[in-house]
Image (cartoon, grey):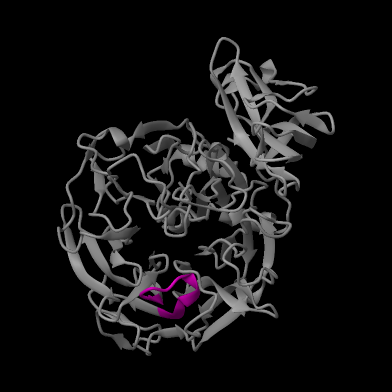
Amino acid sequence: MAYMKDSKGRRLDSFEVEAKAFTPPVAFAPVPGFLSGLSSYNGTSYNQDSVSTADGKQYAVWYDEAGALIIAKRTLPRGRWSTFSLSTIAGNPLVLPVDNDPHNTISIIVDAAGYIHVSANMHGDVLRYVRSTNPHDIAAWTAPGMTGLNEAQVTYPRFALHPDGTLFFLYRDGASGFGDLFLNKWNGTAWTQIGKLADGKTTSENPYESRFVIGRDGSLNLAITWRPNGGDANTNNDVHFIRSTDKGATWKSVDGTAVALPFVHSNTTALALNTADTNSGIVNQFGLDTDTNNRPHITLSLSSGAGPDRNIHHLYWDGAAWVNQQVTDLGNTMSLLTWGKRPTIACTNDGRTLILYSIARFGATRGIPRLVDVTDGAATDVPLAQLDLRDHEMTFDSRALRERNELNVLLSQANGDVNSPGAEYWNANNFNRQWGGVLTIDLAQVGAVLRREVRLPAIKTVQTLGAPGNTAITATATALVPGSFSALTTPELRNRVIFARLTARASTTAGTLTVQLFESEQNGGNRVFGSIPFTTTSTAFKATPWMPLQYGPLLGADALVQMHALVSSGATGTISAATLELGVIDGPVY
Protein backbone atom coordinates (compact mmCIF):
# COMPACT_ATOMS: atom_id res chain seq x y z
CA MET A 1 0.00 0.00 0.00
CA ALA A 2 1.33 3.45 -0.92
CA TYR A 3 1.24 6.22 1.68
CA MET A 4 1.50 10.00 1.29
CA LYS A 5 4.72 11.22 2.88
CA ASP A 6 6.05 14.53 4.11
CA SER A 7 9.27 16.19 2.89
CA LYS A 8 11.32 13.98 5.24
CA GLY A 9 9.80 10.80 3.81
CA ARG A 10 7.71 10.12 6.91
CA ARG A 11 4.22 8.70 6.50
CA LEU A 12 1.40 11.16 7.10
CA ASP A 13 -1.57 10.22 9.25
CA SER A 14 -4.85 9.80 7.39
CA PHE A 15 -6.29 13.09 8.63
CA GLU A 16 -3.22 14.95 7.32
CA VAL A 17 -3.49 13.21 3.93
CA GLU A 18 -7.09 14.31 3.62
CA ALA A 19 -6.21 17.84 4.70
CA LYS A 20 -3.36 18.17 2.21
CA ALA A 21 -5.65 17.09 -0.61
CA PHE A 22 -7.73 20.21 0.08
CA THR A 23 -5.04 22.60 1.30
CA PRO A 24 -5.55 26.16 -0.01
CA PRO A 25 -2.42 27.96 -1.25
CA VAL A 26 -2.92 30.66 1.40
CA ALA A 27 -4.85 30.35 4.66
CA PHE A 28 -5.29 32.67 7.64
CA ALA A 29 -6.14 31.39 11.13
CA PRO A 30 -7.04 34.22 13.55
CA VAL A 31 -5.78 33.63 17.08
CA PRO A 32 -8.10 34.14 20.06
CA GLY A 33 -8.01 37.32 22.10
CA PHE A 34 -6.04 40.45 21.34
CA LEU A 35 -2.35 41.18 20.77
CA SER A 36 -0.52 44.20 22.08
CA GLY A 37 0.65 46.59 19.39
CA LEU A 38 2.22 48.96 21.93
CA SER A 39 5.59 47.68 20.76
CA SER A 40 6.78 45.47 17.93
CA TYR A 41 7.89 42.64 20.24
CA ASN A 42 5.26 40.31 18.73
CA GLY A 43 6.90 40.66 15.34
CA THR A 44 10.55 41.56 14.91
CA SER A 45 13.18 39.99 12.70
CA TYR A 46 14.79 38.34 15.73
CA ASN A 47 11.66 36.45 16.84
CA GLN A 48 12.85 32.88 16.22
CA ASP A 49 10.22 31.59 16.22
CA SER A 50 6.74 32.95 17.00
CA VAL A 51 5.11 29.79 15.61
CA SER A 52 6.25 26.16 15.90
CA THR A 53 4.63 23.12 14.31
CA ALA A 54 5.25 19.51 15.28
CA ASP A 55 3.41 16.19 15.24
CA GLY A 56 0.29 17.62 13.62
CA LYS A 57 -0.01 20.40 16.21
CA GLN A 58 0.71 24.10 15.88
CA TYR A 59 1.77 26.51 18.62
CA ALA A 60 1.93 30.31 18.64
CA VAL A 61 3.07 32.83 21.26
CA TRP A 62 2.35 36.51 21.75
CA TYR A 63 2.00 39.28 24.32
CA ASP A 64 -1.62 40.31 24.87
CA GLU A 65 -3.08 43.73 25.63
CA ALA A 66 -2.21 43.35 29.33
CA GLY A 67 1.40 42.38 28.62
CA ALA A 68 0.81 38.72 29.54
CA LEU A 69 2.57 36.07 27.45
CA ILE A 70 0.02 33.78 25.81
CA ILE A 71 0.73 30.40 24.25
CA ALA A 72 -1.87 28.89 21.93
CA LYS A 73 -2.17 25.38 20.54
CA ARG A 74 -4.33 23.80 17.87
CA THR A 75 -4.52 20.51 15.98
CA LEU A 76 -3.95 20.92 12.27
CA PRO A 77 -5.39 21.56 9.85
CA ARG A 78 -8.32 23.52 11.34
CA GLY A 79 -8.64 22.73 15.02
CA ARG A 80 -9.76 25.35 17.51
CA TRP A 81 -7.09 27.20 19.45
CA SER A 82 -6.68 26.57 23.18
CA THR A 83 -4.62 29.05 25.21
CA PHE A 84 -2.64 29.33 28.42
CA SER A 85 -1.05 32.38 30.05
CA LEU A 86 2.62 31.83 30.81
CA SER A 87 2.28 34.78 33.19
CA THR A 88 0.59 32.38 35.64
CA ILE A 89 3.57 30.02 36.00
CA ALA A 90 4.54 29.76 39.67
CA GLY A 91 7.26 32.24 40.56
CA ASN A 92 6.75 34.22 37.32
CA PRO A 93 10.09 33.08 35.80
CA LEU A 94 9.53 35.13 32.62
CA VAL A 95 9.07 38.30 34.76
CA LEU A 96 5.78 39.36 33.21
CA PRO A 97 4.01 41.59 32.25
CA VAL A 98 6.36 42.64 29.50
CA ASP A 99 7.91 46.10 29.31
CA ASN A 100 7.11 48.01 26.13
CA ASP A 101 10.50 47.42 24.55
CA PRO A 102 10.68 45.77 21.10
CA HIS A 103 13.79 43.81 22.17
CA ASN A 104 11.67 41.75 24.60
CA THR A 105 10.78 39.17 21.99
CA ILE A 106 9.52 35.59 22.37
CA SER A 107 11.20 32.47 20.98
CA ILE A 108 9.37 29.12 20.91
CA ILE A 109 10.22 25.68 19.55
CA VAL A 110 8.91 22.17 20.02
CA ASP A 111 11.77 19.69 20.32
CA ALA A 112 12.01 16.20 18.82
CA ALA A 113 10.34 14.64 21.88
CA GLY A 114 7.43 17.11 21.86
CA TYR A 115 8.59 19.30 24.75
CA ILE A 116 7.92 23.01 24.29
CA HIS A 117 10.74 25.49 24.96
CA VAL A 118 10.11 29.23 25.42
CA SER A 119 12.57 32.05 26.12
CA ALA A 120 11.28 35.61 26.29
CA ASN A 121 11.19 39.14 27.70
CA MET A 122 14.89 39.98 27.86
CA HIS A 123 16.89 43.06 26.92
CA GLY A 124 20.16 42.70 28.75
CA ASP A 125 18.50 40.64 31.51
CA VAL A 126 19.29 37.39 33.30
CA LEU A 127 18.23 34.43 31.12
CA ARG A 128 14.48 33.76 31.22
CA TYR A 129 13.50 30.30 30.00
CA VAL A 130 10.75 27.75 30.61
CA ARG A 131 10.05 24.25 29.32
CA SER A 132 6.82 22.27 29.27
CA THR A 133 6.61 19.56 31.92
CA ASN A 134 5.03 17.14 29.47
CA PRO A 135 5.21 16.76 25.68
CA HIS A 136 2.69 18.94 23.82
CA ASP A 137 1.22 20.22 27.11
CA ILE A 138 0.77 24.01 27.26
CA ALA A 139 -0.61 24.09 30.82
CA ALA A 140 2.28 22.70 32.92
CA TRP A 141 5.74 24.27 32.99
CA THR A 142 9.11 24.17 34.69
CA ALA A 143 11.84 26.82 34.86
CA PRO A 144 14.99 24.68 35.05
CA GLY A 145 17.56 27.20 33.80
CA MET A 146 20.15 26.27 31.19
CA THR A 147 23.88 26.16 31.89
CA GLY A 148 24.36 29.04 34.35
CA LEU A 149 27.22 30.31 32.17
CA ASN A 150 27.26 33.77 30.54
CA GLU A 151 23.56 34.32 31.24
CA ALA A 152 23.59 37.63 33.14
CA GLN A 153 22.85 40.03 30.27
CA VAL A 154 20.84 38.15 27.65
CA THR A 155 19.09 39.45 24.52
CA TYR A 156 17.97 37.89 21.20
CA PRO A 157 17.15 34.27 22.15
CA ARG A 158 16.98 31.90 19.15
CA PHE A 159 16.17 28.18 19.05
CA ALA A 160 16.97 25.85 16.13
CA LEU A 161 16.40 22.09 15.80
CA HIS A 162 18.91 19.74 14.16
CA PRO A 163 17.61 16.85 12.01
CA ASP A 164 18.99 14.37 14.57
CA GLY A 165 16.94 15.98 17.37
CA THR A 166 19.66 18.11 18.99
CA LEU A 167 18.25 21.49 20.00
CA PHE A 168 20.45 24.60 19.82
CA PHE A 169 20.05 27.96 21.57
CA LEU A 170 21.86 31.09 20.33
CA TYR A 171 21.86 34.36 22.28
CA ARG A 172 23.77 37.56 22.96
CA ASP A 173 25.39 38.26 26.29
CA GLY A 174 26.18 41.95 26.64
CA ALA A 175 24.82 45.09 25.03
CA SER A 176 24.72 47.03 21.79
CA GLY A 177 28.29 47.87 20.86
CA PHE A 178 29.63 45.53 23.54
CA GLY A 179 28.34 41.98 23.13
CA ASP A 180 29.29 38.34 22.55
CA LEU A 181 27.31 35.50 20.94
CA PHE A 182 27.04 32.18 22.79
CA LEU A 183 25.72 28.81 21.65
CA ASN A 184 24.13 26.13 23.84
CA LYS A 185 22.80 22.67 22.97
CA TRP A 186 20.15 20.40 24.49
CA ASN A 187 20.52 16.63 24.14
CA GLY A 188 17.07 15.76 25.46
CA THR A 189 18.07 15.69 29.12
CA ALA A 190 20.49 18.59 29.77
CA TRP A 191 21.82 21.86 28.37
CA THR A 192 25.55 22.37 27.80
CA GLN A 193 27.40 25.40 26.48
CA ILE A 194 29.36 24.86 23.28
CA GLY A 195 31.12 28.16 23.81
CA LYS A 196 31.53 31.74 22.66
CA LEU A 197 30.72 31.89 18.97
CA ALA A 198 31.54 35.54 18.28
CA ASP A 199 33.43 38.15 20.30
CA GLY A 200 32.52 41.81 20.21
CA LYS A 201 33.42 42.90 23.73
CA THR A 202 37.17 42.73 23.11
CA THR A 203 36.91 45.30 20.29
CA SER A 204 33.95 47.25 21.77
CA GLU A 205 31.60 46.06 19.05
CA ASN A 206 28.43 44.05 18.78
CA PRO A 207 28.15 41.08 16.40
CA TYR A 208 24.52 41.24 15.29
CA GLU A 209 23.36 37.80 14.23
CA SER A 210 21.16 36.87 11.30
CA ARG A 211 18.47 34.21 11.51
CA PHE A 212 20.18 31.10 12.91
CA VAL A 213 19.74 28.35 10.32
CA ILE A 214 20.23 24.60 10.35
CA GLY A 215 20.52 23.34 6.80
CA ARG A 216 18.99 20.23 5.31
CA ASP A 217 22.43 18.64 5.61
CA GLY A 218 22.54 19.35 9.36
CA SER A 219 25.00 22.24 9.05
CA LEU A 220 24.74 25.23 11.42
CA ASN A 221 24.74 28.54 9.52
CA LEU A 222 25.02 32.14 10.69
CA ALA A 223 25.67 35.55 9.14
CA ILE A 224 26.89 38.51 11.20
CA THR A 225 27.08 42.28 10.83
CA TRP A 226 28.93 44.57 13.23
CA ARG A 227 28.22 47.80 15.13
CA PRO A 228 30.79 49.83 17.08
CA ASN A 229 30.13 50.95 20.63
CA GLY A 230 28.15 54.20 20.62
CA GLY A 231 26.84 53.68 17.08
CA ASP A 232 23.35 53.24 15.71
CA ALA A 233 21.83 51.41 12.74
CA ASN A 234 23.70 53.74 10.37
CA THR A 235 27.02 52.38 11.68
CA ASN A 236 26.26 48.72 10.97
CA ASN A 237 28.94 47.44 8.61
CA ASP A 238 30.29 44.34 6.85
CA VAL A 239 28.68 40.92 6.53
CA HIS A 240 30.38 37.65 7.49
CA PHE A 241 29.11 34.11 7.02
CA ILE A 242 30.21 31.08 9.04
CA ARG A 243 29.16 27.43 9.03
CA SER A 244 29.66 24.33 11.18
CA THR A 245 29.28 20.79 9.85
CA ASP A 246 29.97 19.11 13.20
CA LYS A 247 27.19 20.62 15.33
CA GLY A 248 29.15 23.64 16.50
CA ALA A 249 32.49 22.06 17.44
CA THR A 250 34.38 23.76 14.59
CA TRP A 251 33.46 26.47 12.10
CA LYS A 252 34.39 27.36 8.52
CA SER A 253 33.80 30.00 5.88
CA VAL A 254 31.52 29.16 2.96
CA ASP A 255 34.47 27.83 0.91
CA GLY A 256 35.57 25.48 3.70
CA THR A 257 38.40 27.59 5.17
CA ALA A 258 38.73 27.01 8.92
CA VAL A 259 37.57 29.87 11.16
CA ALA A 260 38.97 30.26 14.67
CA LEU A 261 36.58 30.83 17.59
CA PRO A 262 35.51 33.12 18.97
CA PHE A 263 34.88 34.75 15.62
CA VAL A 264 36.00 38.39 15.37
CA HIS A 265 35.32 41.27 12.99
CA SER A 266 38.89 41.36 11.67
CA ASN A 267 38.54 37.91 10.14
CA THR A 268 38.61 38.27 6.34
CA THR A 269 38.31 34.63 5.24
CA ALA A 270 34.58 34.55 6.10
CA LEU A 271 33.75 38.00 4.67
CA ALA A 272 30.66 37.89 2.46
CA LEU A 273 30.30 41.65 1.90
CA ASN A 274 32.73 44.47 2.64
CA THR A 275 30.86 47.74 3.24
CA ALA A 276 31.60 51.31 4.26
CA ASP A 277 31.88 51.88 8.00
CA THR A 278 28.84 54.18 7.98
CA ASN A 279 25.65 54.46 5.93
CA SER A 280 25.98 50.96 4.48
CA GLY A 281 22.20 50.70 4.67
CA ILE A 282 22.38 47.49 6.73
CA VAL A 283 19.74 47.13 9.41
CA ASN A 284 20.91 44.49 11.86
CA GLN A 285 19.33 41.04 12.24
CA PHE A 286 18.48 40.24 8.66
CA GLY A 287 17.36 37.01 7.01
CA LEU A 288 19.36 33.88 6.17
CA ASP A 289 18.55 30.43 4.81
CA THR A 290 20.30 27.65 2.86
CA ASP A 291 18.96 26.04 -0.30
CA THR A 292 18.70 22.39 -1.32
CA ASN A 293 22.36 22.53 -2.44
CA ASN A 294 23.28 23.93 1.01
CA ARG A 295 24.30 27.28 -0.47
CA PRO A 296 23.59 30.29 1.79
CA HIS A 297 21.15 33.05 0.85
CA ILE A 298 21.04 36.33 2.81
CA THR A 299 18.50 39.11 2.50
CA LEU A 300 19.19 42.54 3.97
CA SER A 301 18.83 46.23 3.29
CA LEU A 302 21.72 48.06 1.64
CA SER A 303 22.38 51.55 0.36
CA SER A 304 21.80 51.50 -3.39
CA GLY A 305 20.14 53.39 -6.20
CA ALA A 306 20.33 57.05 -7.18
CA GLY A 307 19.05 58.38 -3.84
CA PRO A 308 20.79 56.54 -2.41
CA ASP A 309 17.95 54.51 -0.96
CA ARG A 310 17.77 51.72 1.60
CA ASN A 311 16.77 48.87 -0.72
CA ILE A 312 16.32 45.16 -0.10
CA HIS A 313 19.09 42.96 -1.54
CA HIS A 314 19.69 39.27 -2.07
CA LEU A 315 23.25 38.26 -1.19
CA TYR A 316 24.01 34.64 -2.08
CA TRP A 317 26.84 32.19 -2.73
CA ASP A 318 26.71 30.80 -6.29
CA GLY A 319 29.27 28.08 -5.65
CA ALA A 320 32.27 30.22 -6.52
CA ALA A 321 31.60 33.75 -5.24
CA TRP A 322 29.17 35.94 -3.34
CA VAL A 323 26.60 37.64 -5.62
CA ASN A 324 24.82 40.84 -4.52
CA GLN A 325 21.44 41.35 -6.24
CA GLN A 326 19.31 44.47 -5.68
CA VAL A 327 15.70 43.31 -5.30
CA THR A 328 13.69 46.51 -4.74
CA ASP A 329 13.86 50.05 -6.04
CA LEU A 330 11.95 51.82 -3.29
CA GLY A 331 12.98 55.45 -3.67
CA ASN A 332 12.67 55.68 0.11
CA THR A 333 15.91 57.56 0.92
CA MET A 334 18.17 56.46 3.76
CA SER A 335 15.86 57.70 6.53
CA LEU A 336 15.18 55.22 9.30
CA LEU A 337 11.53 56.37 9.17
CA THR A 338 11.00 55.15 5.62
CA TRP A 339 13.13 52.01 5.45
CA GLY A 340 11.55 48.69 4.66
CA LYS A 341 10.93 46.39 7.57
CA ARG A 342 13.73 43.86 7.94
CA PRO A 343 13.26 41.11 5.37
CA THR A 344 13.54 37.39 5.89
CA ILE A 345 14.30 34.66 3.36
CA ALA A 346 13.14 31.07 2.89
CA CYS A 347 14.53 28.38 0.59
CA THR A 348 11.83 25.85 -0.24
CA ASN A 349 12.14 22.08 -0.51
CA ASP A 350 11.55 22.31 -4.26
CA GLY A 351 14.28 24.85 -5.00
CA ARG A 352 12.68 28.28 -4.79
CA THR A 353 14.21 31.21 -2.91
CA LEU A 354 11.63 33.60 -1.45
CA ILE A 355 12.01 36.93 0.36
CA LEU A 356 9.31 38.26 2.71
CA TYR A 357 9.19 41.98 3.52
CA SER A 358 6.94 44.98 4.08
CA ILE A 359 7.27 48.77 4.02
CA ALA A 360 5.81 50.27 7.20
CA ARG A 361 4.72 53.72 6.08
CA PHE A 362 6.06 54.52 2.64
CA GLY A 363 4.62 54.18 -0.83
CA ALA A 364 1.49 52.59 -2.23
CA THR A 365 2.13 49.19 -0.62
CA ARG A 366 2.66 50.56 2.88
CA GLY A 367 2.29 47.95 5.59
CA ILE A 368 1.31 45.14 3.19
CA PRO A 369 3.21 41.84 3.65
CA ARG A 370 4.92 40.95 0.40
CA LEU A 371 6.66 37.97 -1.18
CA VAL A 372 9.47 38.16 -3.76
CA ASP A 373 10.60 35.13 -5.73
CA VAL A 374 14.32 35.66 -6.39
CA THR A 375 15.02 32.17 -7.70
CA ASP A 376 17.65 32.21 -10.46
CA GLY A 377 17.95 36.00 -10.32
CA ALA A 378 14.26 36.73 -10.88
CA ALA A 379 12.35 39.27 -8.78
CA THR A 380 8.61 38.58 -8.90
CA ASP A 381 7.02 40.72 -6.16
CA VAL A 382 3.43 40.03 -4.98
CA PRO A 383 1.29 40.70 -1.88
CA LEU A 384 0.69 37.92 0.67
CA ALA A 385 -2.27 39.58 2.39
CA GLN A 386 -4.17 42.85 2.16
CA LEU A 387 -3.49 43.61 5.81
CA ASP A 388 -1.50 46.56 7.19
CA LEU A 389 1.26 45.35 9.52
CA ARG A 390 2.83 48.79 10.15
CA ASP A 391 6.00 48.02 12.16
CA HIS A 392 5.32 44.30 12.62
CA GLU A 393 8.06 42.27 10.92
CA MET A 394 7.59 38.80 9.49
CA THR A 395 9.37 35.67 10.67
CA PHE A 396 8.41 32.08 10.04
CA ASP A 397 8.16 28.63 11.60
CA SER A 398 11.52 26.92 10.97
CA ARG A 399 10.26 23.37 11.51
CA ALA A 400 7.29 23.79 9.17
CA LEU A 401 9.51 25.12 6.39
CA ARG A 402 11.77 22.06 6.45
CA GLU A 403 9.28 19.38 7.43
CA ARG A 404 6.05 20.53 5.75
CA ASN A 405 7.28 22.88 2.99
CA GLU A 406 5.09 25.61 4.48
CA LEU A 407 5.55 29.19 5.58
CA ASN A 408 3.72 29.81 8.85
CA VAL A 409 3.89 33.47 9.83
CA LEU A 410 2.33 35.24 12.84
CA LEU A 411 0.79 38.47 11.55
CA SER A 412 -0.38 41.43 13.60
CA GLN A 413 -0.05 45.21 13.65
CA ALA A 414 2.25 47.42 15.70
CA ASN A 415 3.64 50.93 15.48
CA GLY A 416 6.97 51.66 17.14
CA ASP A 417 6.48 51.51 20.90
CA VAL A 418 5.15 53.82 23.57
CA ASN A 419 8.67 54.89 24.57
CA SER A 420 9.69 55.64 20.97
CA PRO A 421 6.47 55.88 18.98
CA GLY A 422 6.50 55.67 15.24
CA ALA A 423 4.79 58.09 12.93
CA GLU A 424 0.98 57.86 13.07
CA TYR A 425 1.10 56.37 16.57
CA TRP A 426 -0.93 59.27 18.07
CA ASN A 427 -2.46 57.39 20.97
CA ALA A 428 -1.88 54.08 22.75
CA ASN A 429 -5.56 53.18 22.34
CA ASN A 430 -4.99 52.78 18.59
CA PHE A 431 -2.58 49.89 19.15
CA ASN A 432 -2.96 48.42 22.64
CA ARG A 433 -5.59 45.90 21.50
CA GLN A 434 -4.80 44.55 18.05
CA TRP A 435 -5.63 41.57 15.86
CA GLY A 436 -3.41 38.58 15.18
CA GLY A 437 -3.37 35.34 13.22
CA VAL A 438 -1.19 32.71 11.59
CA LEU A 439 -0.78 33.04 7.82
CA THR A 440 0.11 29.75 6.11
CA ILE A 441 1.49 29.50 2.57
CA ASP A 442 1.62 26.03 1.04
CA LEU A 443 4.90 26.31 -0.84
CA ALA A 444 3.98 23.49 -3.20
CA GLN A 445 1.33 25.90 -4.52
CA VAL A 446 3.28 29.16 -4.24
CA GLY A 447 3.26 29.48 -8.04
CA ALA A 448 -0.45 30.36 -7.87
CA VAL A 449 0.39 33.08 -5.33
CA LEU A 450 3.11 34.47 -7.59
CA ARG A 451 0.67 34.52 -10.53
CA ARG A 452 -1.85 36.42 -8.35
CA GLU A 453 -4.45 33.69 -8.78
CA VAL A 454 -5.12 33.34 -5.05
CA ARG A 455 -7.65 35.09 -2.84
CA LEU A 456 -5.80 36.81 0.01
CA PRO A 457 -6.87 37.67 3.57
CA ALA A 458 -8.15 41.24 3.83
CA ILE A 459 -10.32 43.43 6.03
CA LYS A 460 -13.47 44.17 4.03
CA THR A 461 -15.57 47.23 4.83
CA VAL A 462 -19.19 46.32 5.66
CA GLN A 463 -20.49 49.69 6.91
CA THR A 464 -19.45 53.29 6.26
CA LEU A 465 -20.84 56.37 8.01
CA GLY A 466 -19.84 60.00 7.66
CA ALA A 467 -20.11 63.16 9.75
CA PRO A 468 -21.50 66.46 8.41
CA GLY A 469 -18.87 68.69 6.87
CA ASN A 470 -17.41 71.61 8.83
CA THR A 471 -18.88 70.49 12.16
CA ALA A 472 -17.99 72.76 15.08
CA ILE A 473 -16.72 71.13 18.29
CA THR A 474 -16.78 72.96 21.61
CA ALA A 475 -17.22 70.10 24.10
CA THR A 476 -14.26 69.65 26.45
CA ALA A 477 -15.30 66.11 27.42
CA THR A 478 -15.75 63.39 24.83
CA ALA A 479 -19.19 63.54 23.22
CA LEU A 480 -20.97 62.42 20.07
CA VAL A 481 -19.98 64.48 17.03
CA PRO A 482 -23.05 66.66 16.35
CA GLY A 483 -25.10 65.44 13.38
CA SER A 484 -23.20 62.16 13.01
CA PHE A 485 -24.86 58.75 12.86
CA SER A 486 -24.09 55.63 14.88
CA ALA A 487 -22.96 52.31 13.42
CA LEU A 488 -24.84 49.31 14.81
CA THR A 489 -23.53 45.81 14.26
CA THR A 490 -26.15 43.39 12.98
CA PRO A 491 -26.95 39.88 14.29
CA GLU A 492 -25.22 38.10 11.41
CA LEU A 493 -21.94 39.61 12.60
CA ARG A 494 -22.20 38.02 16.05
CA ASN A 495 -19.36 35.73 17.19
CA ARG A 496 -16.99 37.33 14.68
CA VAL A 497 -14.17 39.80 15.15
CA ILE A 498 -15.41 43.18 13.89
CA PHE A 499 -13.01 46.01 13.13
CA ALA A 500 -13.41 49.78 13.16
CA ARG A 501 -11.39 52.50 11.46
CA LEU A 502 -11.65 56.30 11.73
CA THR A 503 -10.54 58.76 9.05
CA ALA A 504 -10.78 62.50 9.64
CA ARG A 505 -9.59 65.95 8.71
CA ALA A 506 -9.94 68.68 11.32
CA SER A 507 -8.43 71.79 12.88
CA THR A 508 -8.72 73.87 16.03
CA THR A 509 -8.30 77.52 16.98
CA ALA A 510 -6.01 76.56 19.89
CA GLY A 511 -4.80 73.57 21.85
CA THR A 512 -5.82 70.11 20.59
CA LEU A 513 -8.96 68.73 19.00
CA THR A 514 -9.26 64.96 19.42
CA VAL A 515 -11.55 62.92 17.20
CA GLN A 516 -12.09 59.36 18.42
CA LEU A 517 -14.35 56.34 18.46
CA PHE A 518 -16.71 55.11 21.14
CA GLU A 519 -18.08 51.57 21.35
CA SER A 520 -20.70 50.19 23.70
CA GLU A 521 -22.58 46.94 24.13
CA GLN A 522 -26.22 46.85 25.24
CA ASN A 523 -26.20 46.21 28.99
CA GLY A 524 -22.45 45.71 28.70
CA GLY A 525 -19.14 47.54 28.64
CA ASN A 526 -17.99 50.58 26.70
CA ARG A 527 -14.76 52.32 25.88
CA VAL A 528 -13.17 55.16 23.92
CA PHE A 529 -10.53 54.16 21.38
CA GLY A 530 -9.14 55.15 17.99
CA SER A 531 -7.99 58.65 18.88
CA ILE A 532 -6.59 61.16 16.36
CA PRO A 533 -5.24 64.55 17.55
CA PHE A 534 -5.41 67.76 15.49
CA THR A 535 -3.80 71.12 16.26
CA THR A 536 -3.75 74.54 14.66
CA THR A 537 -1.15 73.32 12.17
CA SER A 538 -1.76 69.55 11.84
CA THR A 539 -4.85 69.59 9.64
CA ALA A 540 -4.14 66.92 7.00
CA PHE A 541 -6.28 63.78 6.60
CA LYS A 542 -5.38 61.14 9.18
CA ALA A 543 -6.60 57.60 9.71
CA THR A 544 -6.35 55.10 12.53
CA PRO A 545 -5.40 51.51 11.81
CA TRP A 546 -8.14 48.90 11.68
CA MET A 547 -8.88 48.06 15.34
CA PRO A 548 -10.86 45.08 16.68
CA LEU A 549 -13.99 45.86 18.67
CA GLN A 550 -13.74 44.69 22.28
CA TYR A 551 -17.44 44.24 22.95
CA GLY A 552 -20.60 43.18 21.15
CA PRO A 553 -20.18 40.70 18.27
CA LEU A 554 -17.14 38.97 19.72
CA LEU A 555 -19.23 38.20 22.82
CA GLY A 556 -22.29 37.08 20.85
CA ALA A 557 -24.08 40.44 21.19
CA ASP A 558 -24.44 43.65 19.20
CA ALA A 559 -22.42 46.85 19.54
CA LEU A 560 -22.94 50.56 18.89
CA VAL A 561 -19.97 52.49 17.47
CA GLN A 562 -19.93 56.30 17.28
CA MET A 563 -17.64 59.19 16.38
CA HIS A 564 -16.83 61.34 19.41
CA ALA A 565 -14.72 64.46 19.81
CA LEU A 566 -13.40 66.90 22.42
CA VAL A 567 -11.34 70.09 22.28
CA SER A 568 -9.14 72.07 24.64
CA SER A 569 -10.92 74.49 26.92
CA GLY A 570 -11.60 77.86 25.30
CA ALA A 571 -10.95 76.57 21.79
CA THR A 572 -13.26 75.72 18.91
CA GLY A 573 -12.54 72.73 16.74
CA THR A 574 -13.80 72.12 13.23
CA ILE A 575 -14.17 68.67 11.69
CA SER A 576 -14.00 69.20 7.94
CA ALA A 577 -14.72 65.56 7.16
CA ALA A 578 -14.84 62.28 9.06
CA THR A 579 -15.68 58.69 8.22
CA LEU A 580 -16.31 55.68 10.43
CA GLU A 581 -15.92 52.22 8.86
CA LEU A 582 -16.71 48.76 10.21
CA GLY A 583 -15.02 45.75 8.65
CA VAL A 584 -14.55 41.99 8.84
CA ILE A 585 -11.72 39.64 7.91
CA ASP A 586 -12.45 38.27 4.45
CA GLY A 587 -10.74 35.69 2.26
CA PRO A 588 -9.28 32.26 3.08
CA VAL A 589 -9.96 32.47 6.83
CA TYR A 590 -10.18 29.22 8.80
Corner quadrant of residue 228: bottom left
The spot of residue 162 in percent (x, y) is 32, 62
Please provide the residue range marked out in magenta: 226-240
Q: Which residue is outermost to the front?
A: 570
Q: Nearer the viewer, residue 372 or 218?
A: 372
Relative to residue 438, is residue 363 depicted above or below?
Answer: below
Queried whether the magenta region covers residue 237, the answer comes back as: yes
State the residue at coordinates (53%, 40%): 428
Relative to residue 146, is residue 518 depicted above or below?
Answer: above
Q: Nearer the viewer, residue 421 or 113?
A: 421
The spot of residue 267 in percent (x, y) is 34, 87
Queried whether the magenta region covers residue 291, the answer comes back as: no
Left or right, 47 with respect to 571, comes to left
Q: Nearer the viewer, residue 328 or 424?
A: 424
State the residue at coordinates (63%, 48%): 388
Left or right, 552 with respect to 39, comes to right
Relative to residue 171, is residue 315 depicted above or below?
Answer: below
Q: Is residue 94 visible?
A: yes
The spot of residue 79 in percent (x, y) is 48, 32
Q: Is residue 291 visible?
A: no
Q: Which residue is outermost to the right?
A: 469
Relative to residue 236, is residue 428 depicted above or below?
Answer: above
